């Protein structure tokens, strides 16, 4: 199974084309998102604005950096869960000093800017978060762990369903 987490959510940059828009997030998504046919040159200039403020922007930046610096999706998922649980406190979430330095170096520099721009470009137009797709279909029941598990188990095509799927099907 493939998993992709895009750490951008309802953040946005502020291209000039959206300066007078009443809904700046919708304008940014339409003007600069993946579906935009021609993006203005200033789509990803400056710093993004996050729905929940600077702490959310910092956590998203750490997650964007970790996504490129951590060796596999399992390590990234553990890091992501910790960063959310620990309110973005990097030292609590990466005990390996080399990995922590790599993520911090990305966060502090131009690599972090590019990691955030990559996340912004990959974020689909959406009307709420989290925006979860399973096999390309939006999952409406994201409020419960069982809804996601059931959707993943229903989509699973391997030889034998994982044991966790038995509980989800009940």
Image (cartoon, helix red, strand yellow):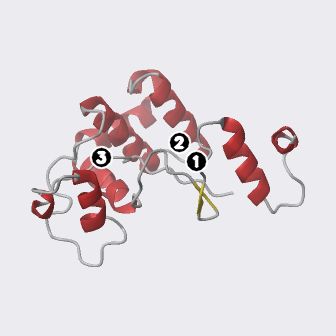
Label of residue 96 in the image: none
On the image, the x and y values in percent for residue 133 come to: 57, 57
In the displayed structure image, the side of residue 169 where residue 145 appears, left or right: left
Residue farthest front in this picture: 22
**Residue under the point 39% across and 60% down:** 125
Mark before the other along the chain sequence, 2 or 3: 3
Residue bearing the label numbered 3: 11
Q: Quadrant of the C terminus?
A: top right
Q: Which residue is mark 1?
A: 73
Tally of marks:
3
Say above or below: 114 vs 87.
Answer: below
Is residue 87 depicted above or below 108 in this figure?
Answer: above
Kindly check if marks 3 and 1 are in contact, taking CB atoms under 8 A apart as contact. Answer: no
Q: Of helix, strand and loop, which one carries label 1?
A: helix
Residue 127 location (% of width, % of height): 41, 52
Viewer can see residue 95: no
The foreground one among 134 and 72 is 134
The dot on residue 76 is 2
Q: Mark 3 falls on what kind of element?
A: loop
Q: Position of residue 130 (x, y in %)?
A: 49, 45
Q: Position of residue 55 (x, y in %)?
A: 29, 29
Q: Earlier in the sequence, mark 3 or mark 1?
A: 3
Q: Please tell me in which quadrant of the rendered image residue 50 appears.
A: top left
Q: CA distance from mark 1 to mark 2?
A: 5 Å
Assess disc 3: are there few (<14), some (14-19) or many (≥20) residues with their C-alpha within 10 Å of its C-alpha.
many
Distance from disc 2 to disc 3, alpha carbons, whole Å, reads 21 Å
Q: Residue at x 50, y 36 (%)?
A: 80
């Amino acid at each position: 199974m493939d998993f992709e987490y895009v750490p951008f959510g309802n953040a946005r940059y502020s291209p000039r084309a959206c300066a007078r828009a009443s809904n700046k997030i919708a304008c940014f998504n339409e003007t600069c998102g993946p579906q935009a046919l021609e993006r203005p040159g200033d789509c990803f200039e400056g710093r993004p604005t996050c729905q929940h403020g600077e702490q959310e922007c910092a956590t998203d930046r750490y997650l964007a950096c970790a996504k490129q610096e951590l060796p596999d999706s399992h390590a990234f998922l553990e890091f992501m869960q910790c960063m959310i649980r620990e309110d973005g406190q990097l030292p609590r979430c990466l005990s390996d000093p080399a990995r922590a330095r790599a993520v911090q170096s990305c966060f502090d520099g131009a690599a972090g800017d590019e990691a955030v721009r990559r996340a912004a470009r990959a974020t689909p137009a959406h009307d709420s978060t989290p925006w979860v797709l399973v096999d390309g279909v939006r999952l409406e029941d994201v409020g419960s762990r069982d809804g996601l598990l059931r959707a993943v188990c229903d989509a699973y095509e391997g030889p034998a369903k994982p044991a966790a799927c038995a509980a989800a099907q009940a």
